[in-house]
Amino acid sequence: MPEEKAIIRESILVIEPQGSHQVVALNLDDNIVKMIVPAEMKLNYNDTIGLDFNRERLHLFDKDSEKRIN
């Protein structure tokens, strides 16, 4: 992803190859976040990757009430 589009930049903690895909773990604000990416993506432990989201498909929730806020 082009750096100017990334809204989050984090280092990879773990890469778990799963055949057709890989599970990539990042530390985001003291929380482990896992994402599924294609097996063809060439990633390495400790690489810094940039993330962006399709804001039309992003859902945000209130931490306490667990109700959707957008």
Image: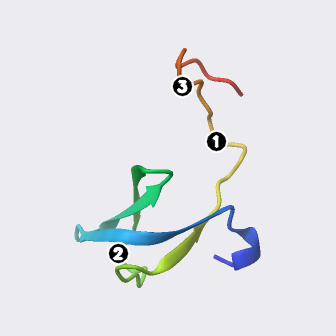
Mark pair 2, 1: CA separation = 24 Å
Name the N-terminal-most of marks 3 and 1: 1
Quick check: marks 3 and 1 in contact, CB under 8 Å?
no
Q: Which image quarter is the N terminus in?
A: bottom right
Q: Measuring 68% from the left and 67% from the top, which residue is drawn there? A: 6
Instruction: Kindly indicate the quadrant of the structure image that contains residue 18.
Output: bottom left
Q: Foreground mark, 2 or 1?
A: 1
Pick the residue in front: 38 or 11.
11
Q: As shown in the figure, which amino acid type bears the numbered disc 2?
A: Ala
Q: Secondary structure at mark 1?
A: loop
Q: Residue furthest top?
A: 65
* Residue that mark 1 sits on: 58
How many numbered callouts?
Answer: 3
Mark pair 2, 3: CA separation = 33 Å
Pick the residue in front: 48 or 2.
48
Q: Residues within 10 Å of mark 1 (few under 14, many from 20)?
A: few
Q: As shown in the figure, which amino acid type bears the numbered disc 1?
A: Leu
Q: Secondary structure at mark 2?
A: loop
Horizontal arrangement in the rendering, residue 25 relative to residue 64 (left or right): left
Q: Measuring 62% from the left and 33% from the top, which residue is drawn there? A: 60
Mark pair 3, 1: CA separation = 16 Å
Q: Which image quarter is the C terminus in?
A: top right
The mark found on residue 63 in the picture is 3
The x, y position of residue 26, in whole percent, is: 42, 62
Pick the residue in front: 31 or 3.
31
Q: Foreground mark, 2 or 3?
A: 3
Q: Residues within 10 Å of mark 2 (few under 14, many from 20)?
A: some
Name the N-terminal-most of marks 2 and 1: 2
Name the N-terminal-most of marks 2 and 3: 2
Residue 34 vs 22, above or below: the answer is above
